[in-house]
Structure formats: structure tokens, C-alpha cells
């Protein structure tokens, strides 16, 4: 027997991203690019199942021993921390770390804190304002590991909020400022190292994870090198030629390369509708011309989602309902104004005439990047063709949503909007985007300033239902979504299908397409 | 002499501050409400968040206080970008390898090529070679670099697979590093070769008539010796000083178009991204760095000239 | 053959080009410098040919509405996601996965193909050319007028005026031109400045025109400074003429040739800069067509329909090239002994748009 060959270094999979995540510090990040990594580095008290399809939207216990016990009419959540957990730097986890994590997210502030933490957890507002030293609504006992959270009011999706990576526990005492290149340690199968600003980062296995033995959260196979390159075509070809392993699903594969992919690599390319994102145009029902129901109907009736799909390189699934398929409450009934994918121009023109709004000037608000800008270019010319006087106004991406959120000064009539689910609960869509109670004078997300009393009351009523009991109110949500479609408060044009494309080094059968996070890093195994 | 140097240095410092102030003020105008708090808060911001950010970054302080604080941060290395809170110095450092590789490689190529073309065109002035080189130069200055880059990427990259399509590979992998930089080097050089070779041609043709050349010929030096020892040396001086300035500009992030089309995430690309994200601090840092590099090189050149030629000092 | 014993056509012992010597012989009294220049221009056939080419391009673009209405029957913004018949076969204008049809080479019928929004490339090329040329012209006008004013004021009054103007110009020039362009373009796009917002062509022209003022102002200032020293200015002052009168009637004509030489250079530059700014998203905003928007949209869709990059790109290069060659000939005609001014104040054109 000869000498044993030296142990081989674990192979790394190579990822191409088109966009750098906002931050690998969970206290700041509120982007899909960041969440995709962070959910595996910072496990929360609850987390999501590592499964494809609808099953992946289900919650499982994370750092807690079980899903929270909900009491007090939905206002109190009790959960016990698992024993023996350690952070990736070896420090033991204690219950009070949870309080510190929430406080840090408020302090930095995390992008979702204004919606999901500050108004929700009792005492959070006082802490954020600086009048309290800690969040009074959270009490912890380090000896037993018990955590009790009091809410200001019953908030159905709170279990989902606990699963956000930004509420994934980090050690108390870690600096309360963003540490972009050396983020905090977390409890999870992976950790991030070698962060180079705007260029690359490595996601490597956390050696201390195996001992944690949390059921339902796999340890993962290989480490990952992530490189950011803005040339999407080059990234596509790199994966096609196996010089890179994974394509960023949030980017769009150029249509011309699809032919090559179909012929050379069809087995490793899947166009999947994760079912969590809706692309739509908002219609401002408090301004002319869309304060008229017929005018809104006209827009929906004639919109040619097929044309829009072509503009989007065939990745759009035409649709009419606001809630996408992965969110419970997505209706199954046929669309009220014609099958999506065709557009009845004649009928739309007639409706516009009938509404008396023909000739009204309309400004269409649009982002700069493709294909959103091209979608709005088409939409503008479409509006003109059915009888309005439409002009397109393009806004720099960085300021687009802030600009159209200036509801008090701007009153935008119509324009592009999209929403990707934070969690599979309709409150995430309706509560933020269509609830009349959520209209703000600035930083508004209800761009169409929809204020329908029926809609508002249903959302308030159903919003208190905990996620685990969602199935009991699904039909009511469906009814509401059908109502919204009939009222045409928004003109949905489709759900996005995302390209899941890998090299042939990756074992396809093990891949998990997580509906909330896209790829599941832990399922990537190199041959 | 000392007064000359000191004066130039003072002007340089004043210039840096002026540029940074202009940038700062421009963005105050551009940002909604004059500060990026709303942008940093992102979507789903509520007034409490925005207020928190405003207080934390000091956006509620008077403009001149904010400006001083920003400058102090930049010089102290404690400036952080608004978008991702990266340390600005770290961001620039991350982009430097790509930019410096691009600049130096292209710089050497364009300088040598210009000297070759310019000298050839001058020697064969009026003849066919000269005309061809002139046409090539004219095309070079008439072509947007990203258009030429797109052509290279498409034909040499997609169709023929001769060059990689984008990206920068660290020099730790020399073969890949080189291969990824060939197309960007050529693209960036085209423009400069067009200009420099024509300048050199003109300068050489003018120098030929100077007295010292005829003296050299009268002394019996051979054609080649006159060319090398006298003509070229004199003609190259203005080219070299221009080269230094242009190189400084490229390193400081001036080659934005080339870096964009080839996805070289260098300093130029960073500058461009920071404008898109309305990231004032990063942009101010980069702009000041570029201006510093250009001004330092310019001042050094002038000091060098003044040292050589006393007539200039007295101006 | 060699530099020292050059071909007789180029250099002679006197140091003057032989052509000039010959010319001097034929020139009589009463032939002004512009007439001389015109004669030299006429001899430079290549330069003239390119000048004519440029005029043809301008004419073609001005005829955009004619082509659009009478030949192609489609406007530059009209989108079509249906099908057309090409050579007997029915084809999708934009395929299901978003690939537009290539050039059909049938006049009036998507002659140069379609873009990803189903618009006719040929029609957009002409309308876009109009916009690009318009922006170039306006930008050049802004640059030349303001630079001349700055140069005159700074060079004539010297002292404090010169100090202020020169420092301001230096600050503007210290900014890399493209970067300043996108900063200003983005500011205008995001916020606007009074009546100027990013969606107008005028604002783009304004930005481009502004950025290059120092490049022209500095040489003009240098020339004015030198002229200021001359006797005729003192004579005019002694006659009691107002400053403005002196600047306009005595000094301005003497810098006129410099100004004229700069015009084609700045026009070429402005067109190139518009393309660059638009590629970076800070120039012309959609749906306004321009050569820049067409090239950058085409680049974003590589490798589909590369003709959408080539067509506007070649058009742009031809236009800029013809301006450059003509401008070169113009410079030679106005002052054949002019060296390219090299100095610490004049940067090379190279920095302007890379």
C-alpha cells in the first residue's frame, strides 16, 4: 500500500450574482439577495421548511423548541429557546440575545422594522424613539430560556416575523452599527467570510452547526464562492459553459441565449414561478381618470399581458389576481375581465368612451431598468391607444419608490409597482399595499391610494388571524381578492417566473426551490 | 522656487475643497428633502425610521456642519456609504486592482502604439502610410468606447469565443487576468492612440525645422541618431506629461464607460454606481481622489519643467 | 523617406510648407484671410467630401417625418407585437422570448428590423438622429457662447475677474467630464432645476454644453490675454471706446478663427458625450429616441439582434467622423501653421469621453 493521498479541500460552488446584496449584516439588509444568504446564517426563533413549492412556505421551529404558543387573544407569544446552542464564534446563546437582536434591528434601523417590529411589539416605539432603554414588551429568562413577547394588538403574521433573518439571533453586546465587512456571528449552517465591498463574498459551512442538531435545517454540502458581475449575458454563458455553477435567479436570462440553453442544457434549466411576486400597475382611485370604475375596467380589459411577457423575455405568467399563487387566498375563479394573456382593445376603447374619461392626460411612472421601463413604455402607448393622453415619466431606480410614495405632493395616477412576499400571508400584500389605513403622506406604499371601506375592514379583521390558522380564513381572503380584481384597483399583469439555472457539476435531484428565498444553499451538492 | 511650489500646493488644496463642496451641494439639491434619509430607509419606511436615520447621520444639522463632518470623515477614513454602509476607503480599495490593471496596461499599450504610429506618420508624411494612419486615428476618436467594446464583445467574444465577455480576475491568476484585460485595454487605447499619435506627428514635424536639428545634421550625425537623440526626445516631452495626466484620470475613475461595458468593477464603475444610488459620500471621495491625483501629477510636471527651464518659473 | 531630407512636397529649407509658398505667390492684395482659407479648403478634397457626407446625414435625419409618414407608415414610438409578412413568410415582430426581428431589407417595412418593443429601427434611427444632432448643436452653441464670453471677460479684464473666472473654470474642469455629466444629469433627472427636468432634450444639451466650457474657454482666454497686450487695444482705449465695444469689434474678430475651429470639434464631442451619458442612464430618457438610447438598449440585449447596436452605432461614428475630418480640414485651412496647442492648460481631447 502506498502513502494515502492528501485530503482534498472541499470543492466550492461558484455563484454569479448580478447585484450585490444590500448588506450581509442582517440588522440592515432588506433585500432578496441578502436574505438568501442571511436566512442560513442567522436562524430565528422560527424558520421556514427547506422544501420546494408550497411546503417551503410553512414554518418550523428554528432556535425555539417549538412554534410559539399564542395566547391572550393573539397578543402574547411564548417560546422557549433550545438548550446548548452556540454562535458561530463559539459563544453560547441565551434568551436575552433575542431582545438585543430586536433592539439592534430597530436601532440600525432594519428596512422592515417600521412595518413589522416598531408598531407591532409593545414598547418598541418607545425604544426606537429613545425614551426607553429596552423593549418593554419582550421579557426573557436566561435560566429557563423562556421568551415572552407582548404585541400592541393581535398580529396574525407574527410567527413569520420571527423567521426574518433580521430577527435571527446575534450575541448581545455586538456593536449597534452596521458592520458591513465583518457581520455578527449567528446560529446557522453557514457563515459569511471574505467580504470584499461590491465584489464578492464567501459563504462557508459553520463547523459548529453539526452539534446543534436542529431538526429540519440541513447542514449543507459545500462552501460557496459568490462573485458579483453586472454583465448578465456573461454570467449566463459562464454557467452554460460550466465555468460557474449557479446563475442568480433574480436576474433575467437574455432571450437570445435561451435557445442555446434549451439545446445544450435543458436538464439543468427550469423557469419556475415561485408564486410569491406580483407585477402590476397601480390605478389611483382618488384622481382622474381612474377614480371612475369603468376607466379602470378598461385598462384591465385591454391590457395585453402576452405582449408584456415578450418584453420580459417570456418570463411573465399572465395573471389578473393581486395575490400570487404561493400566498393562501389566491383565487381559483376565472378572471372577471377576460383571460389574461389577451387584450380586448375594442372593448377597452368602448369602456373608456363610456366612462367619459377619453382624452384625459395620464402620467405613467416608470423605473429605469429593463424590462420595467420597456413594460411601462408599452403600457403608455397602450393607454394612448385606448383613448387617454398618456406620457411616460422615467425615474432613477434608486429614488423611484420614494418618489411615487410622495402621495401628498405628487398624486401619481398610474405606474409600475411590484411586490415580493415577505411571507405567505395575504396581510403582507393587502396590509401594506392596498389597505386604506396604511396610506402615508410620504413613503407611502399604497401607491394608488386605494381607500375602500369594505377592503379595509376585511383586512383588519382577517389580519389578526395567526398564520398557523390561516386555512380557516382562506376562502374569505379569496373573496376579497376577487373583489379587488372586480374593482380593478390595480391592473395586475403577471407573476414573475424566475430562471433556475445551474452547471452540470450540481446534482439536480437534490435542489430545493424555496418559495420565499429562491435557492436553498443547503441543497447544493457538487458531484 | 519654493514660493512657486507652495503656491501650487495651496491652489491644489483649495481646488480639492471646491470640488467636494460642489458635489456635496449638488446632491443636497438632488436628494428628496435634501438628505438621503428616506432613501436609506428604503421601502416600507415609516416616519419613525426616517427620523432615526436623520438623527443618526446628522442630516438635521445645518448644511455647513454636515459638510465639515463629511470631509472630516473622508480624510479620517471613517466615511461610510449610504447604500450599504461600507467603509468608503474599503470600497475604493476593492475597486483599485481592476482600475489600476486597466489603466497601466492600457497606458503602456497606447503610449507605445502612439509613439510608433506618430513617428511613422511623421516620417512618411504626406504619403500613403500617413494617410492610412490618419484615417485610423480619426476613426479612433470618433467611436464611443462602449460601442467599440460591444463590437469586440459580440464578434470576438460571443461569436468566436476568443475573449471572455466580462469581468476582472485577480492577478493571482495571471493567465486569466491577462486574458480578461486584453479587450478592455484595446478599447481604452483606441481613443488615446488616435489623439496622441496625431499630436506626436505634429510635434515631430515642427521639431524637424528647429535650429538644433539642422545643427545636429551639420555636425554629421546620422539620421537615426538625430531622430532618437534630438527630435524624439523633444517631441515626447509634451506627450509624456499628457500621458501622466490621462493615466491619473483613468486611475481616479475616469474610464467609466470602458469599465461599465466590460463589467470591470473598478473605481470608475464605483463612481458611476454611487451616482445612481445618490451616494454622496462615496462620490465625493472618489472625485477628490481623482482631482488630487491629477493635480499632484500636474503640479509635479510643472515643477519639473520649471526646474528644467528657468523661463517658466518667472511667469 | 527620411526626416532630414524630406520629400519636397512637405518641407523646405525656409521652414514653410511649399504649398504656402506657392500660395503666397498667387495671392494678391485684397484677398482676405477667410477667402484664403476657403481656397485652401477647396483644395482639400477629402475634407470637403466628409463635410458633404455630414450634410447628407443631417438631411436624411431631417427627412425623418417624410420617411415615417410616407414610406414606413409608422411612427418612432409605435409598438407592434404582432406579425408581419417577410418575403412570403409570416414572422413575429417580437418573438415569444423577446427577440425582435432583424433587418428585413424591405423599404418601409421594418427595413432595419425592430427593437424589443416592436418599434421600427429605421424610423427611430432617423428621429433619433434628429434628437442627437439637435442636442449636439444646442450643446455646442451653449459651450461656444459661454466659453467665448468667459474667455473674453477673463482675458480682457484680467485681475480679479480673471481670477474668479479661471478658478471657477478650473473647478469645473477638475471633475472628470463624464462623471460631471452624469452627476448633473442625475440631479436634473431626480430633482430638476426650475423648468429643466431629465425628460427634456434641452436639459441633456445643457449638461453637455456646460461640462465643456472650460475646454474652450481656456485657449480663448490665452489668446485674448495675448491680444490685450497689442497696441491697437491701447489705441482703442485712448480713443475712449467702451470696453464692450473693444471686446466685440477689436478682439473678437481676432479670436474668430479659433472659435470657428473649435465648433466642429465640440459638435463631434457633444454627440459622443450624449451617447455616453445615455448609456450610463443620465442622458436622454425614454421614450425619446436618440442614437445613444438605441445603442445602449441594443447593448443590453446582446446577443440578440446585434444589428440594433450596429445600426445606430455606425450612423453615429459616420456622423462624428465626418465632422472630425471636416473640422480637421477647416483647421488646416484657417491656420496651416497652427500647432496643436499643448500646455498645462489645455488637456487632450482624450479625457473628454472615455
Image (cartoon, coloured by chain):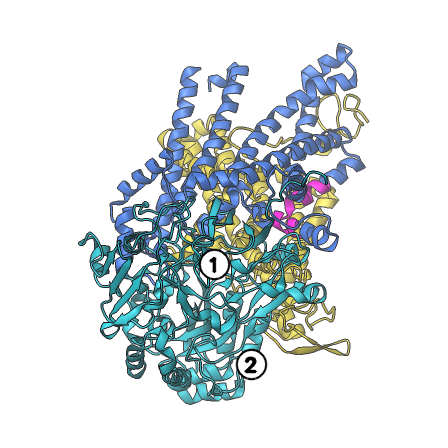
Chain colours: A cyan, B blue, C yellow
Q: Is residue A483 left or right of residue A148?
A: right
Tell me the chain of label 2.
A
Q: For this rendering, which residue is in front, A335 or A330?
A: A330
What predominant SS class does the magenta segment belong to? Answer: helix
| Residue B6, horizontal then vertical, whole percent | 40, 20
Decide whether residue B140 is among the magenta residues: yes
Counting residues from the start of the chain, the first of labels 2 and 1 encountered is 1
| Residue C271, horizontal then vertical, whole percent | 57, 51
The magenta segment is: B135-150
Seen at 55% across and 81% down, the residue is A341
Q: Secondary structure at mark 1?
A: helix
Furthest residue in direction top, as rendered: B219
Seen at 34% across and 37% down, the residue is B73
Q: Is residue C79 above or below residue B225?
A: below
| Residue B111, horizontal then vertical, whole percent | 65, 32
- Circle 2 sits on which residue? A341
Are the residues under marks 2 and 1 on the same chain? yes
- Circle 1 sits on which residue? A36
Residue A119: tell me if it is visible. Answer: yes
Amino acid at each position: 500500500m502506498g502513502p494515502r493521498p492528501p485530503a482534498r479541500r472541499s470543492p466550492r460552488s461558484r455563484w454569479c450574482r448580478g447585484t450585490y446584496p444590500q448588506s450581509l449584516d442582517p440588522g440592515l439588509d432588506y433585500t432578496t439577495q441578502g436574505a438568501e444568504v442571511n436566512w442560513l446564517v442567522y436562524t430565528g426563533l422560527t424558520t421556514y421548511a427547506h422544501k420546494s413549492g408550497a411546503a417551503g412556505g410553512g414554518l418550523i421551529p428554528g432556535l425555539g423548541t417549538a412554534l410559539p404558543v399564542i395566547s391572550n387573544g393573539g397578543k402574547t407569544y411564548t417560546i422557549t429557546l433550545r438548550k446548548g446552542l452556540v454562535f458561530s464564534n463559539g459563544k453560547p446563546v441565551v434568551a436575552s440575545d433575542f431582545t438585543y437582536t430586536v433592539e439592534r434591528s430597530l436601532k440600525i434601523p432594519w428596512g422592515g422594522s417600521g412595518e413589522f417590529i416598531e408598531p407591532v411589539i409593545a414598547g418598541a416605539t418607545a425604544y426606537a424613539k429613545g425614551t426607553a432603554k429596552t423593549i418593554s414588551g419582550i421579557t426573557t429568562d436566561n435560566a429557563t430560556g423562556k421568551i415572552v413577547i407582548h404585541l400592541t394588538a393581535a398580529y396574525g403574521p407574527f410567527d413569520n416575523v420571527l423567521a426574518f433573518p433580521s430577527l435571527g439571533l446575534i450575541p448581545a453586546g455586538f456593536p449597534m452599527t452596521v458592520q458591513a465587512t465583518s457581520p455578527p456571528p449567528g446560529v446557522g449552517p453557514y457563515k459569511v467570510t471574505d467580504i470584499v465591498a461590491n465584489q464578492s463574498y464567501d459563504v462557508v459551512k459553520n463547523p459548529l452547526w453539526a452539534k446543534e442538531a436542529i431538526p429540519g435545517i440541513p447542514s449543507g454540502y459545500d462552501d460557496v464562492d459568490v462573485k458579483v458581475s453586472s454583465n448578465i449575458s456573461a454570467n449566463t454563458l459562464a454557467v452554460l459553459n460550466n465555468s460557474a455553477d449557479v446563475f442568480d435567479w433574480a436576474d433575467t436570462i437574455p432571450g437570445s441565449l435561451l435557445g442555446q440553453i434549451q439545446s445544450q442544457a435543458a436538464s439543468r434549466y427550469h423557469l419556475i414561478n415561485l408564486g410569491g411576486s406580483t407585477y402590476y400597475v397601480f390605478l389611483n382611485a382618488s384622481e382622474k381618470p381612474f377614480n371612475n370604475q369603468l376607466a379602470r375596467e378598461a385598462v384591465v380589459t385591454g391590457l395585453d399581458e402576452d405582449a408584456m411577457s415578450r418584453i420580459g423575455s417570456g418570463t411573465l405568467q399572465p395573471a389578473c389576481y393581486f395575490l400570487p399563487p404561493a400566498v393562501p387566498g389566491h383565487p381559483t375563479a376565472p378572471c372577471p375581465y377576460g383571460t389574461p394573456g389577451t387584450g380586448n382593445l375594442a372593448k377597452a376603447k368602448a369602456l373608456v368612451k363610456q366612462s367619459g374619461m377619453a382624452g384625459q392626460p395620464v402620467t405613467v411612472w416608470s423605473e429605469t431598468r429593463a424590462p420595467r421601463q420597456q413594460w411601462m413604455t408599452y403600457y403608455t402607448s397602450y393607454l394612448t391607444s385606448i383613448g387617454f393622453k398618456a406620457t411616460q415619466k422615467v425615474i432613477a431606480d434608486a429614488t423611484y419608490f420614494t418618489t411615487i410614495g410622495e402621495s401628498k405632493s405628487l398624486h401619481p395616477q398610474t405606474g409600475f409597482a411590484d411586490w415580493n412576499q415577505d411571507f405567505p400571508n395575504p396581510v403582507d400584500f393587502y396590509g401594506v399595499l392596498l389597505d386604506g389605513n396604511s396610506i402615508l403622506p410620504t413613503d407611502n406604499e399604497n401607491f394608488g391610494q386605494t381607500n375602500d371601506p369594505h377592503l379595509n375592514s376585511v383586512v383588519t379583521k382577517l389580519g389578526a388571524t395567526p398564520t398557523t390558522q390561516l386555512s380557516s380564513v382562506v376562502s374569505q381572503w379569496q373573496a376579497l381578492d376577487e373583489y379587488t380584481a372586480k374593482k380593478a384597483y390595480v391592473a395586475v399583469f403577471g407573476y414573475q417566473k424566475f430562471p433556475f439555472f445551474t452547471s452540470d457539476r450540481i446534482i439536480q435531484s437534490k435542489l430545493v426551490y424555496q418559495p420565499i428565498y429562491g435557492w436553498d444553499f443547503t441543497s447544493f451538492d457538487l458531484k | 522656487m519654493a514660493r512657486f511650489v507652495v503656491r501650487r500646493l495651496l491652489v491644489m488644496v483649495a481646488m480639492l475643497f471646491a470640488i467636494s463642496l460642489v458635489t456635496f451641494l449638488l446632491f443636497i439639491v438632488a436628494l428628496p428633502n435634501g438628505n438621503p434619509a428616506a432613501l436609506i430607509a428604503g421601502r416600507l419606511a415609516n416616519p419613525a425610521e426616517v427620523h432615526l436615520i436623520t438623527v443618526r447621520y446628522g442630516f438635521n444639522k445645518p448644511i455647513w456642519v454636515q459638510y465639515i463632518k463629511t470631509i472630516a470623515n473622508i480624510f479620517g477614513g471613517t466615511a461610510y456609504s449610504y447604500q450599504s454602509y461600507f467603509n468608503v476607503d474599503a470600497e475604493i480599495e476593492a475597486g483599485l486592482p481592476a482600475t489600476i490593471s486597466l489603466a497601466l496596461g492600457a497606458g503602456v499599450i497606447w503610449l507605445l502604439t502612439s509613439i510608433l504610429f506618430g513617428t511613422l506618420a511623421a516620417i512618411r508624411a504626406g504619403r500613403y502610410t500617413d494617410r492610412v494612419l490618419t484615417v485610423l486615428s480619426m476613426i479612433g476618436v470618433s467611436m464611443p468606447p462602449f460601442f467599440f467594446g460591444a463590437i469586440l464583445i459580440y464578434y470576438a467574444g460571443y461569436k468566436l469565443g476568443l475573449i471572455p465577455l466580462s469581468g476582472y480576475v485577480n492577478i493571482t491568476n495571471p493567465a486569466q487576468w491577462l486574458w480578461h484585460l486584453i479587450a478592455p485595454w484595446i478599447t481604452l487605447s483606441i481613443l488615446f492612440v488616435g489623439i496622441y499619435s496625431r499630436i506626436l506627428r505634429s510635434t515631430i514635424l515642427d521639431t524637424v525645422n528647429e535650429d538644433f536639428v539642422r545643427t545636429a545634421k551639420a555636425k554629421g550625425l546620422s539620421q537615426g541618431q538625430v531622430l532618437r537623440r534630438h527630435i524624439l526626445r523633444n517631441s515626447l516631452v509634451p506627450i509624456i506629461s499628457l500621458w501622466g495626466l490621462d493615466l491619473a484620470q483613468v486611475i481616479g475613475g475616469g474610464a467609466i464607460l470602458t469599465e461599465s461595458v466590460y463589467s470591470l468593477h473598478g473605481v470608475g464603475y464605483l463612481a458611476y454606481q454611487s451616482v445612481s444610488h445618490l451616494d454622496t459620500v462615496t462620490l465625493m471621495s472618489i472625485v477628490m481622489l481623482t482631482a488630487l491625483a491629477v493635480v499632484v501629477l500636474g503640479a509635479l510636471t510643472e515643477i519639473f519643467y520649471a526646474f528644467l527651464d528657468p523661463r517658466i518659473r518667472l511667469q | 523617406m527620411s526626416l532630414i531630407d524630406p520629400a519636397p512636397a512637405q518641407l523646405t529649407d525656409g521652414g514653410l510648407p511649399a504649398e504656402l509658398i506657392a500660395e503666397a505667390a498667387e495671392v494678391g492684395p485684397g484677398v482676405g484671410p477667410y477667402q484664403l482659407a476657403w481656397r485652401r479648403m477647396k483644395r482639400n478634397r477629402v475634407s470637403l467630401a466628409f463635410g458633404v457626407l455630414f450634410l447628407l446625414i443631417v438631411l436624411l435625419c431631417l427627412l425623418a417625418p417624410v420617411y415615417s409618414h410616407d414610406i414606413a407608415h409608422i411612427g418612432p414610438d409605435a409598438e407592434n407585437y404582432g406579425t408581419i409578412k417577410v418575403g412570403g413568410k409570416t414572422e413575429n415582430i417580437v418573438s415569444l422570448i423577446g427577440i425582435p426581428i432583424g433587418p428585413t431589407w424591405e423599404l418601409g417595412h421594418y427595413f432595419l428590423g425592430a427593437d424589443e418593443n416592436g418599434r421600427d429601427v429605421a424610423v427611430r434611427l432617423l428621429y433619433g438622429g434628429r434628437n442627437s444632432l439637435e442636442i449636439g448643436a444646442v450643446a455646442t452653441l451653449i459651450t461656444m457662447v459661454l466659453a467665448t464670453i468667459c474667455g473674453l471677460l477673463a482675458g480682457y479684464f484680467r485681475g480679479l475677474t480673471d481670477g474668479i473666472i479661471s478658478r471657477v473654470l478650473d473647478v469645473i474642469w477638475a471633475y472628470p467630464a463624464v462623471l460631471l455629466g452624469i452627476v448633473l444629469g442625475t440631479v436634473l433627472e431626480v430633482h430638476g432645476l426650475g423648468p429643466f427636468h431629465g425628460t427634456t432634450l434641452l436639459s441633456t444639451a445643457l449638461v453637455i454644453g456646460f461640462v465643456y466650457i472650460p475646454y474652450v474657454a481656456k485657449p480663448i482666454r490665452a489668446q485674448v490675454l495675448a491680444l490685450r497686450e497689442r497696441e491697437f487695444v491701447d489705441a482703442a482705449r485712448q480713443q475712449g471706446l467702451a470696453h464692450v465695444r473693444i471686446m466685440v469689434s477689436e478682439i473678437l474678430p481676432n479670436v474668430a478663427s479659433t472659435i470657428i475651429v473649435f465648433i466642429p470639434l465640440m459638435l463631434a464631442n457633444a454627440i459622443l458625450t450624449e451617447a455616453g451619458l445615455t448609456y450610463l442612464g443620465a442622458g436622454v430618457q425614454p421614450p425619446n429616441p436618440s442614437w445613444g438610447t438605441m445603442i445602449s438598449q441594443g447593448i443590453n440585449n446582446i446577443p440578440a439582434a446585434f444589428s440594433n447596436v450596429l445600426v445606430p452605432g455606425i450612423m453615429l461614428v459616420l456622423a462624428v467622423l465626418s465632422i472630425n475630418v471636416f473640422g480637421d480640414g477647416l483647421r488646416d485651412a484657417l491656420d496651416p501653421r497652427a500647432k496643436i496647442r499643448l500646455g498645462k492648460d489645455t488637456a487632450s481631447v482624450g479625457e473628454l469621453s472615455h
